[in-house]
Image: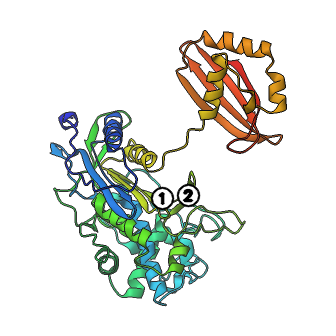
Amino acid sequence: MRFLLLPLLALFAVMPALAKPLDTTAIDRAAIEALKTTQVPAASIAVVEDGRIVYSKAYGTQAPGEPAVMTARYPIASISKQITATAILMLADEGKLKLSDPVGKYVPGLTDGNKVTIRQILSHTSGYRDYWPQDFSFAAMEHPVTPRQILDKWGKAPLDFAPGSQWQYSNTGYVIAGLIVEKVSGEPLMTFLEQRILKPLHMTSAVDADTGMTRADAAPHMRYALGPVRLEKPAAPGWLFAAGELAMTADDLARWDIGMIDRKLLSPASYKAQQTPVILTDGESSHYGLGLFIRDANGHRELEHGGEAVGFLSENRIFPDDRDAIVVLVNADFGDAQDAIADAIQRQLFPEPDQTARAKRVFDMLRSGRFDRSLFTVDGNYYFTPTAIADYHESLAKLGEPTGFTQRSNTLRGGFTSEVYRVTYPNRTLTVVLRAVPGENGKIEQFTVYPAG
């Protein structure tokens, strides 16, 4: 398709002084490369540092012949779930419901509605079967639907498991949650969200994706296998509802993230409930709170969720303790460009330490013929006799400079770290095993090099 050959355009950027300097050139390069590699037409990103939007930019073509702009809205799909969960928690803070309430108290006629709790539908531990597990729109989605019609089919089916015993993603649970918000508040869900959440956080672009998007917004795209990229037809109205109905700009989703970081809407107890993994009946963690995956990203607490609508993907990562966040929205439901771009931004926010530095230093020392005995334990020094040092030098020096040096594993054995590295050359690969006393300055017990297949 001709529009895919248009040059990628960066049409909007916001770059005040940064608390931690971003290599924005590297971010741009990663975004452009991700779109080129995946053939995803467009991406819109926003980066939050220290509770402020510090960088936002649009890339590619949001519709045939239309350069991407930051004012274009994209459906955020299942990222909407954390906003729906927040609506429930606001009502809980007001004493109008409890997370321990059975869902049947508010939505009658559901399977085991007297047993499944609100907490369980928000944490995907209810057992209600997901009405949309496919990564495409199925036949029924040609026709409009109501939340009640969804529940009449999927909310009255047998549970997939006993409530609380397993974690299984279920859009059905969030349809129930949306009806609970409407029942308790006495308002349509979108009205409640607009008045209580979107306006207070100045999310002025946010709309119902079924009814609020226009030709000025991003267009959906799909692809069959490795075939041409095609415009996609959205599902008929009603299929997203509280499970994923919102569309907005990347900047407005970043404003939501700032609201989460600053804890603007809920009580401390409710934020804790939302951001704490739910424990299953067997004692195992679900790694999911209320509308959020809870992860550890190299020592940084991460609240994460992705979204998928017909023709769109999205990624949202919040690091509340660092006061940082990453938003990436794309207008295609293939390629996972949103993850590649988010990963590149995350590496800018939180550079990973070079796990190979010590091993590289010792390897270079040995191939140069030098040897520092202060780095080694008694047994390490015992191994490196003059003959061993000479053989290491003579055999490694003639190989020249390595083309790669990567860590393959890092475990513990016999009270030492047990680190394995792969060293590559144009026509040869080596394995390095390093064992050392644990700790940054721990002495090295073993450093051995072997030919690898």
For disc 2, the neighbor class at 10 Å (few under 14, some 14 to 19, many from 20) is: some
At a point 33% along the width and 42% down the height, the residue shown is 31
Q: Is residue 426 left or right of residue 58?
A: right
Q: Could you tell me which quadrant the C terminus lies in? A: top right
Please, what secondary structure does the residue beneath circle 2 have? strand
Residue type at numbered disc 1: Glu
Q: Which mark is residue 295?
A: 2
At a point 55% along the width and 42% down the height, the residue shown is 353
CB within 8 Å, label 1 to label 2: yes
Q: Which residue is mark 1?
A: 304
Residue type at numbered disc 2: Arg
Residue 391 percent coordinates (x, y)? 73, 11
Residue 42 percent coordinates (x, y)? 27, 45
105 above or below 232?
Answer: below
Near-viewer residue (420 or 35): 420
Please, what secondary structure does the residue beneath circle 1 have? strand
At a point 28% along the width and 68% down the height, the residue shown is 208
9 above or below 271?
Answer: above
Residue 312 percent coordinates (x, y)? 33, 52
Residue 167 percent coordinates (x, y)? 60, 62
Q: Could you tell me which quadrant the N terminus lies in? A: top left
Residue 175 is at least partly visible in this image? no
Q: Is residue 117 left or right of residue 24?
A: right
Near-viewer residue (210 or 336): 336
Residue found at the far bottom of this picture: 95
Residue 285 is at least partly visible in this image? yes
When asked about the image quadrant of residue 101, the answer is bottom right
